[in-house]
Amino acid sequence: MSDPTASTVTGAPGGRATSAPLLGRAPEPTLFELSHPGRRAWSFRTTGIPEVELDDLVPDEHRRHQPVPVAEVSERDLVAHFTRLSHRQFSVDLGAYPLGSCTMKYNPKVCDTVAGLPGLAGVHPAAPASLTQGWLALLVELEETLCEITGMAAATLQPAAGAAGELTGLLLMRAWHQAQGSVRTKVIIPDSAHGTNPASVTLGGYQVVTVPSDERGCVDMAALATVLDEDVAGIMLTNPNTLGLFEEDIAAIAAAVHEVGGLLYYDGANLNAILGVVRPGDMGFDIVHMNLHKTFATPHGGGGPGAGPVAVSERLVPFLPGPRPVRAESQNGTPVYEWTTPPLSIGRVHTWHGNALVLARALAYILINGGDGLKKIAEVAVLNANWIRQRLTGTYDVPFDRPCMHEVVLSVRTIKQAHGVRALDVAKRLLEEGFHSPTVYFPLIVDEALMIEPTETESPQTLEALAEALERIADEANSRDEGWMAEFPHGTPVRRVDEARAARTLIPTFDARD
Amino acid sequence: MSDPTASTVTGAPGGRATSAPLLGRAPEPTLFELSHPGRRAWSFRTTGIPEVELDDLVPDEHRRHQPVPVAEVSERDLVAHFTRLSHRQFSVDLGAYPLGSCTMKYNPKVCDTVAGLPGLAGVHPAAPASLTQGWLALLVELEETLCEITGMAAATLQPAAGAAGELTGLLLMRAWHQAQGSVRTKVIIPDSAHGTNPASVTLGGYQVVTVPSDERGCVDMAALATVLDEDVAGIMLTNPNTLGLFEEDIAAIAAAVHEVGGLLYYDGANLNAILGVVRPGDMGFDIVHMNLHKTFATPHGGGGPGAGPVAVSERLVPFLPGPRPVRAESQNGTPVYEWTTPPLSIGRVHTWHGNALVLARALAYILINGGDGLKKIAEVAVLNANWIRQRLTGTYDVPFDRPCMHEVVLSVRTIKQAHGVRALDVAKRLLEEGFHSPTVYFPLIVDEALMIEPTETESPQTLEALAEALERIADEANSRDEGWMAEFPHGTPVRRVDEARAARTLIPTFDARD
Amino acid sequence: MGTYIPHTDDEVASMLAFLGLESVDALFEVVPEALRLQHDLELAGGAGEPDVLARMEEFAGANRARSDRLVCFAGGGAYDHEIPSVTRALAGRSEFVTSYTPYQPEVAQGVLQAIFEYQTMVARLAGLPVANASLYDGGSAAVEAVNLGVAASGRPTVWVSAGIHPHWRQMLTTFAAGTGHQLRTIPLVDGLTAWPDGGADDDPPGVLLVGYPNYLGCIEDLGQARAVCDRTGALLVVGADPVAAGLLKSAGEWGADVMVGEGQAFGTTLGFGGPYLGLFACAQAHLRRLPGRLVGETVDVEGRQAYVTTLRAREQDIRREKATSNVCTNQTLMAVTAAIQLGWLGTSGLVELARRCAQGTRYTRDALLSLDRVEPYVTAPVLREFALRLPVPADVVVERMADAGFLAGIPLGGEFDDGEHGLLISVTERRTRDEIDAYVTALGKAVA
Amino acid sequence: MGTYIPHTDDEVASMLAFLGLESVDALFEVVPEALRLQHDLELAGGAGEPDVLARMEEFAGANRARSDRLVCFAGGGAYDHEIPSVTRALAGRSEFVTSYTPYQPEVAQGVLQAIFEYQTMVARLAGLPVANASLYDGGSAAVEAVNLGVAASGRPTVWVSAGIHPHWRQMLTTFAAGTGHQLRTIPLVDGLTAWPDGGADDDPPGVLLVGYPNYLGCIEDLGQARAVCDRTGALLVVGADPVAAGLLKSAGEWGADVMVGEGQAFGTTLGFGGPYLGLFACAQAHLRRLPGRLVGETVDVEGRQAYVTTLRAREQDIRREKATSNVCTNQTLMAVTAAIQLGWLGTSGLVELARRCAQGTRYTRDALLSLDRVEPYVTAPVLREFALRLPVPADVVVERMADAGFLAGIPLGGEFDDGEHGLLISVTERRTRDEIDAYVTALGKAVA
Ligand SMILES: Cc1ncc(COP(=O)(O)O)c(C=O)c1O
Ligand SMILES: Cc1ncc(COP(=O)(O)O)c(C=O)c1O
């Protein structure tokens, strides 16, 4: 049999589902391998515009003579490829995702509808306020709502994520001190803090001063006293902190920091724990960022987008980024919205107005829950975490054995010492049980940390199943030999991944393959 | 440790993905097992309507006193459940689906957009023509288009699927004969026909007369001659037939059937093969149904919905179901559309106007492809099938060794005789390769049939991979022992399913579980 | 311009070479030259997605009766109920949308289990032990039920209540041309079916078909229908509104042999009448006559729970001309949608839905009846739909009301006594008091 | 009324019992009484999905500048490009939407591989070997690029072309307050950056930042910028329009060290400015300073191809205050969307897209310049965006044009010479000749 086709049948077969875990675990080829010269999926509107020669359109010295080699695939193969990729991906919609510090709660589908409304999604960001009153009204309402929730005076909605909020907050801190005529150099951060905090401090032009945690997992007040001086611009805290513990001395901390003229920054990553219960503003914080993708359930999108609004106390309002939307004196009773830039504004921190569609999702979520519902969120989030803590006490180490807030940090230390099984092994083993892993090795101050945040949307049945799985794993760690555990996971699309090799033989693009 | 929670933690854990094949293969619990009393997901609009006592609303003798026990789940668990179920389901979007006779081609996403347009999806079917001119215009345009494609005079769009179209066609046949004053009792069907044909004939009030296929896989002309008489109301054919072969004698068949006063019915399941190449009307058919879900790519929806319009030649137009949309004399130049019922109409065959949103999808698909594109579809569909045929000749039996149209029927007969491996085994083994199985054991006249319909949307690369997989399987059948093959599939969400037990110990609902 | 074919010209050429063919035309040599189309199809050339979408938007724009333009008070088996984002999102998942009938259960557990759950829900709604995997729509389910009833009773006479949806009755007539069933319409008296005694009938019925509630929204006395069946040996087929079932006794409780219904209310858009969902449930005795697909639970070779289509021997692909029905492709996606929507409603939501419809109906009906010269069409009790008698022809009122922003309802039309002046009005849970008040005011003007 | 909490009161009570607590309040005993909120949040009570959707629709309805109401001629980094159904469908798959940063690669190959493909595409567009997994938006990518450039060159002085998007320049200023970078704006002369020679400068730049094309749509001479860099040892950072890149030489070809850009054009809705997509690619030399996440290819224990986030030691969670950037959550979903959209465009579609934009731009510009008293703002060649000088203030024209059904463009404003009379106009492939002709007519009236 002659095979004149052999020469043209190049490229990976697109219509074959071997890559779907449903049916096997062969790797999915890249889109570049599925590509075949001459295929296409695109189509554009018929415009009727008379055509000009390309030579006339693009100056020759600028003209690209080879097209960018993207990929050439049919719509059918494009769909199959990304659908298959989606089958290789865990998500909240598939199962519990108790990733501590990330608040992987259920993302309501109605918010997808909101983000898709043509009247929101189809608006150009440079259109003047007169043509975008709906958006400005929405943003003002969200700002007011967030201020009520945090107990602050005003907020900027521009920052695109928590870390962006942090840096914005630090620049606010800097501008404020500057306006006071004071030059300060240091910002205090507890050793349990998230990595974005010190990174943001550096970008804010400050030096990081780390303050240790005490044996109760909270800021060591004595140590704090020793670092507090007139060089301190402020302190960054999250409360509950990254151990899931409430900083009970927060009032004293606030007093001490304010005493030396410093400001208090609140990292809102853990706001879910205290909604409607206690407010950063009432605790004495001056600057507060929120992670809307955590607390207000806007989906994490595989790593983003998020939104990190920053709310401030009265004295910091004049420094907020601008332009910001405000409700203006209404002419005929109906409010009018406009953009203003605060007098001492630190300037713009986002190309436009922030991650607007994420902001719209968050407002919808807040409206659905309402004031009462928000409090219930905190209550059940804390209830779930404490249930897990109590249930697993004795099975895993509980480094700080006291009531936690919305998340609990356990440790695999004892098990590791006895059997060599690490937090990482527990995490990988848990994948096989159908749960996403908790956050591991964070906060850094806990050895072999497992940071579990169930969130309020997981039912008691799910908690029970999670606890049973973690108990089973501990049992296995104690009874099986070390190597057995290291083999997990087995049933996932790929098994343990060689991270060292990825860094050593860096292949960041398809073209870097050899 | 006391466990006061044990009593309430009942029900299956909803937030656990063990059921997702991504992560394991535990069965997914039913929604009823995930249910927990008191949970809910629903919310309704606030209406402000003053409330009346339920006792006043529902007469006591009719009132249900226990609610229907549906299920009680959170929105989160509802989402997780059905998302996980979706991960246990093969689909065209995941991979090639060469299910013969079903035309599982790629379903363009733009058609989903069309079916979701508020101006189409939000229209009540009982609204008068004056308020639904857009829909009527759309239906008329689709009807005209389908008539051009099939070479017929007019069509009804009411039938909801192919089988519904068949029965409609048979009732048209009956009404026509009746109008001619002739009473006929029989309808001829080839032995290769799809089961819906004989079933529809019975419901149409006719007796089935089966005509055998000859050694070339086509209607045996001699046998046909012996059954043709004045009792014959007509003949039902699909051309290409279910062997994927073109009935070359179709003109002679038409002449012979017409000669005795019978009508020719065209089962359009295989229309994809001849788009723009040859038309049923030109072949002499009087009545033609189409399967829009096949030929015009409206998605099969896990088993439906479809749409089965029936087109007829001029003489049958007065009998079409009604009401049907027609373009009326325009008053001021712009056309006006209205409903009319043909004078001798057989009546209504759908509760409303047919599967309207499926019809809209099909029109969009046709407009995108255009007249030229439709012909290309047939060409490539036939090319793909012949490539598979040629490639696998020698590997599998090819019962009718001549050029095929859009699909090819192979047989596992030789392999089975030698090694006991059946078509079913090949089908199950192929699942493991990441392809959906071909249709098996149909048409009934081919032993151990594998009916492969690649469709035009599968690329040469995919065909190559499919051919290689089928070659590999034949190799294995010839080299491995019988039991080995019977073990497949291994990697699917469930392995071979006990069908006999399902029928023996019938459990058609959750409540029938014991 | 648009195309979904991946093949490049080179690839086509190469594949032809492999087949030893000169040209694409050669693929069609089996088609007699004389039959082949000698010209191109007289259709426009292909167009891209944006152009075609613009075209479809034009059609959509020409529909005044869109629920985003006219507030909907029409029902008659097609209802403007809430469809939450979650139902749209889940039912739209492409694994459900782009698969076909689960012929290979090993890779179709998703659809199979969803159908199993749907069957369970429909059976519970019906108060009957078995439900199938769906039929085309309410009307086709009624036709199949009558076929089953005639076969089971062995008697071709069918008593059809005049309160059955007129379209269903038309379908029954259409299909009776093939089956030869004798249909007899049993009239309504003031909204309720006036069943003949049936005892001494020389042509006793094999089947009774009655709505619950019926087309006029009236709650029929199924006890009386059941009594006729008991006397005559006929099967009782109930066409039930599955939303009303949230408050009403089930068909099964009334002794129905078969329940059929239109399932559109559970998550399917109005969609100009389709695709909808034919609900079908029956008593155990009729299992072997069940039309359409049925999913059953079983195990795989490893003993894991699994689902599969079962009792396949009833079906056309196996039993051919002796099959209980000719249905092949059904409405699975709508069944899956209904399972999702019913899961969203849940036990309490289904009651609440029915209750809200009933509240709105009561409020609207009372307000309308306070209008001058507007009268009840019949007086039997209604639940979520009702008919009025207007001083102006109902189709005129519908046109006038459209200008005021409402789809006013469905004119009863010629199938009913003085139906020209009858308007069938439906009030779902989506209608607010403000909408209703405005509707009532507008209707007052429209009939003035 | 709305809630996503599954727990029933009984379950809460039972869980509290397990914890030995009397009440839910007891969970918060660790919170000092004095700090606790003594009243409820002053927010409305919860509402159901339909009510909240209605509320959001009200906001949406109050936006006149929706692209379904005003035909969009505004650009400036945010474009009304075609987004096909396939991109929406795939990017909306919940596995992509509801997962987080792929910390566990074994169950995150979907997102990881999509990012790997995205990185490849961005690197190819840039003509540079490495691209990261996304940054917040074009402006933040520029800020990060400048940070990288200053660190790499060891010099804090940054020469920023006045042709860089004004908002990016504002952001650079904002963040320079923290980093201490010295920003110097290099003016435009007739649309192109007039770079100082730089050779004898006593404060030589560490970084040059230039647009390609720039904010006024003009195609900058990158050769000249590169020459300044060569002379001064500065890094060249190019802010490239990735759509124009379909026709223009790549930043890499011009010798750029870093390319940044706004990726919204690839499948992301206008969305009032966010979430958008910060593109970032760089030369191999700067790999260890790359901000944000990077995905690399590797294998699993069985040798199967696998993807994982790599060079993690650069990142904040490991290097903390010494990290190259503080980014954690980025814009992955938009990166995945861009990969899908670029896959849809493909090699030929990207060229075609740029070509169509350029054709429309040429046609529109020529037609507008035939209007009385309408003049070019600058004369340097443009590709897909351009500025005009109008006889009437541009913001007035925008208001007038809105009444005619157009979003006319973006007033240049105070950042530019006589910017009050400058209007920046963008014409994407979606604009038809009819729309453009009507626009030109309307603009003629608006400036009359
Ligand atoms: C405690 C804490 N702070 C800050 C951040 C940074 O927030 P983002 O990822 O939104 O930038 C995180 C995110 O994981 C966090 O957990
Ligand atoms: C040859 C043939 N005829 C008729 C039909 C029936 O069509 P439908 O399933 O749309 O009712 C089929 C469907 O599989 C078929 O393959």
Image (cartoon, coloured by chain):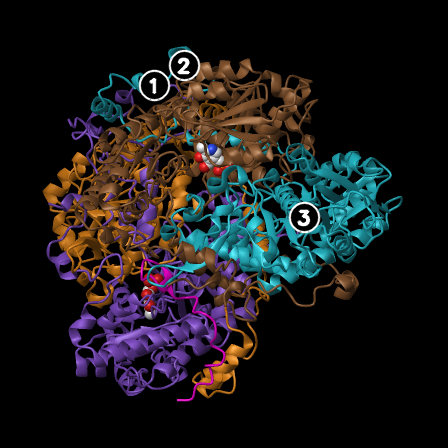
Chain colours: A brown, B purple, C orange, D cyan
Mark 3 near mark 1, Cβ–Cβ under 8 Å? no
Mark 3 residue element: helix
**Residue of label 2:** D36
Mark 1 surroundings: few (<14), some (14-19) or many (≥20) residues within 10 A: many
Mark 1 near mark 2, Cβ–Cβ under 8 Å? yes
**Residue of label 3:** D153
Mark 3 surroundings: few (<14), some (14-19) or many (≥20) residues within 10 A: some
For the record, the magenta segment spans A1-26
Alpha carbon separation for disc pair 3 and 1? 52 Å
Mark 2 surroundings: few (<14), some (14-19) or many (≥20) residues within 10 A: some
Question: In the figure, A310 relative to D130: above or below?
Answer: above
Which residue ends up furthest to the front in the rendered image? Answer: A226
**Residue of label 1:** D28
Foreground mark, 2 or 3?
A: 3
Q: Quarter of the image holding residue D307? A: bottom left
Q: Quarter of the image holding residue A43? A: bottom right
Mark 1 residue element: helix
Mark 2 near mark 3, Cβ–Cβ under 8 Å? no
